[in-house]
Image (tube, coloured by chain):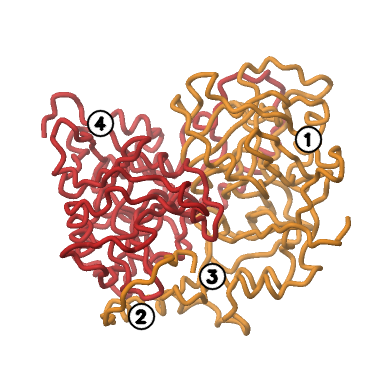
Chain colours: A red, B orange
Amino acid sequence: MRMRRLWRARRRSPPLMLLALCAASTSALAADSPAAPAGSLKTMADVLAASKPSDWRALDPENTLYMELASGRVVIELAPRFAPKHVLTIRALAREHYYDGLVIERVQDDYVAQWGDPDDSRSTGTVPRSLAAEFSRSSDGLDFARLPDPDTYAPETGFVDGFPAARDPASHLAWLTHCYAMVGAGRDNDANSGGGRELYAVIGQAPRSLDRNVTLLGRVVQGIELLSSLPRGSGPLGFYAHPSERIPIRSIRVAADVPEAQRARLEVLRTDTQTFTDLIESRRNRREAWFKVQADRIDVCNVPLPVRSAPAGDGS
Amino acid sequence: MRMRRLWRARRRSPPLMLLALCAASTSALAADSPAAPAGSLKTMADVLAASKPSDWRALDPENTLYMELASGRVVIELAPRFAPKHVLTIRALAREHYYDGLVIERVQDDYVAQWGDPDDSRSTGTVPRSLAAEFSRSSDGLDFARLPDPDTYAPETGFVDGFPAARDPASHLAWLTHCYAMVGAGRDNDANSGGGRELYAVIGQAPRSLDRNVTLLGRVVQGIELLSSLPRGSGPLGFYAHPSERIPIRSIRVAADVPEAQRARLEVLRTDTQTFTDLIESRRNRREAWFKVQADRIDVCNVPLPVRSAPAGDGS
């Protein structure tokens, strides 16, 4: 479906051999997987069309940042359950207008876009300049929607509060995973040298080796393409070689501080719902006619996390 | 290292508890992994600095395409061992100048950039308009440099001829994997409706559910950022809503047909070498001072595939 071309190709007699071989291989892969649950023939479009209003939650304005660029608004949902001190600090920095007039200074292809103060000279006022790392937390008490499939990097992966995450039953730790559009706090070599003055978003293949090496604190829920389509920096690590190339940040605001009429009224699909479980299944095994071979698997960073405009009349 | 900021943060006393917990977790993850081989303290920079000329191979001009855009050249290495018929056909189309003046018509964020003929009206001359799918092939006789780590989607992953690939020992099949910068042949719902008139490159998180559903036939070895930084299309599936938004393709040429002085003299690191094995280890466990927790794992789509300009004097 997603790869479907707009044009129709002429039909030819299909040589079936390769497809038959592929099907055999799929069966082999699927042998140790659970049987498909009832209702698994639904596509993601079917699942979303059947969703109930209670499957969605409005973004909490206190946990939402708007980064305003000349090209538009990037909406970031913060993750206080994983990075409570970083969230407090970034909220405070935004409220001091710390970020206003700073820049996107680094866009490294297949990796990250990063923003902050290239000179590191701006005062943070009363806000601490760095924070203890929040690389992981106890998994106790977390509602962890676990994926059934193996992951290269972690014993278990899944979702907490709409964020992709991993969990280690042995150590009882959980952490956010570096999937596309996740936002973290850049740091120097000292693990505790971050804190939110420098932030980055993932714009490429999930750099999972960063997991538990950087504090992840949120996710871009709208506008990631404003970052991912920026020109790549030609300097080392994708930093812009010349200051004139940097992209100005007009402001970063906590949504709660923005007049209601100017807020993005967004809802995200709750990940603790049957609807989300159904969505995962619809992506583990793609039922669109285009697909010939089912993966019967999914990586935590390949699961879509749907966002929509709040339906009209749903005042909140 | 890669995330290192340009500025130095002030030092604070590091609270060690979180780091200690992380270290414990890493040990748990690493329990069933082989001991680190000798020499594993090398970074990727160390590995590449120690590489020998014979660790590199020049691109074969017959297996190299240049896509010329106003913004520069995209260099694609073709994979005839996995998609021999598609490679023959695309080479023939390039030699008929089929692609010249066509367009990049689709850029879907975190997915693909796709190019071809939006009207599907251009003649292919004597070249067939569609081809039998080449989704997988026999794994017999392939020099498969296997990764030691588990993969979500395939029984085994690794590298063949410099391309990321997967292998299923049960069915004796191998196939290329949809990693960042891989190039495939778009198709309609009919598995055999592709053939090379529409091509795409991956510009986001590896869409591995496409593996064995589309014919992959090559990889962008230079210039992927010319595709990944394009504006995203606002139409369905990321197609440009208005024809004026499409990006013109000046030409696509087989490198062998381009005067030698105008060729990109590139070399790729051979993946059947000890140097590449060392490089993998340098990325499974990052030795740069910045990293606090070692993954001791790597995903096939996270392994860098180095490309360099041929050293001066290395005429070929």
Give the residue number, with chain letter if any, for mark 1.
B253
Cα distance between the residues tagged 1 and 4: 45 Å
Local secondary structure at mark 3: helix
- Residue at 51% in and 68% down: B297
Residue sitting at the far left: A316
Q: Amino acid at mark 2?
A: Ala
- Residue placed under numbered mark 4 in the picture: A309
Apparent side of residue B277 relative to residue B242 in the rendered image (left or right): right
Mark 2 to mark 1 CA distance (whole Å): 54 Å
Q: Name the secondary structure under disc 2.
A: helix
| Tags 3 and 1 both on a single chain | yes
Subunit under mark 1:
B
Looking at the picture, tell me which residue is in the foreground, A305 or A187: A187
Residues beneath discs 3 and 2 located on the same chain: yes
Q: Is A145 left, or right, of B152 in this rendering?
A: left
Report the residue marked by disc 3: B284
Q: Quadrant of the C terminus of chain B?
A: bottom right
Q: Amino acid at mark 1?
A: Arg
Picture coordinates of residue A56 (x, y %)?
A: 21, 38
Q: Is residue B193 above or below residue B138?
A: above
How far across and how far down the image is residue B183, in percent?
A: 64, 41
| Distance from the alpha carbon under mark 4 to that under mark 2 | 42 Å
Earlier-in-chain disc, 3 versus 1: 1
Read off the chain for label 2: B
Residue at which label 2 appears: B24
Q: Secondary structure at mark 1?
A: strand
Q: Please report whichever mark, 2 or 1, sits nearer to the chain's N-terminal start.
A: 2
In the image, residue A286 lies at what x, y percent?
47, 37
Task: Tell me if label 2 and label 1 are in contact, CB under 8 Å.
Answer: no
> What amino acid does circle 4 point to?
Ser
On whether disc 1 and disc 4 are found on a single subunit, the reply is no
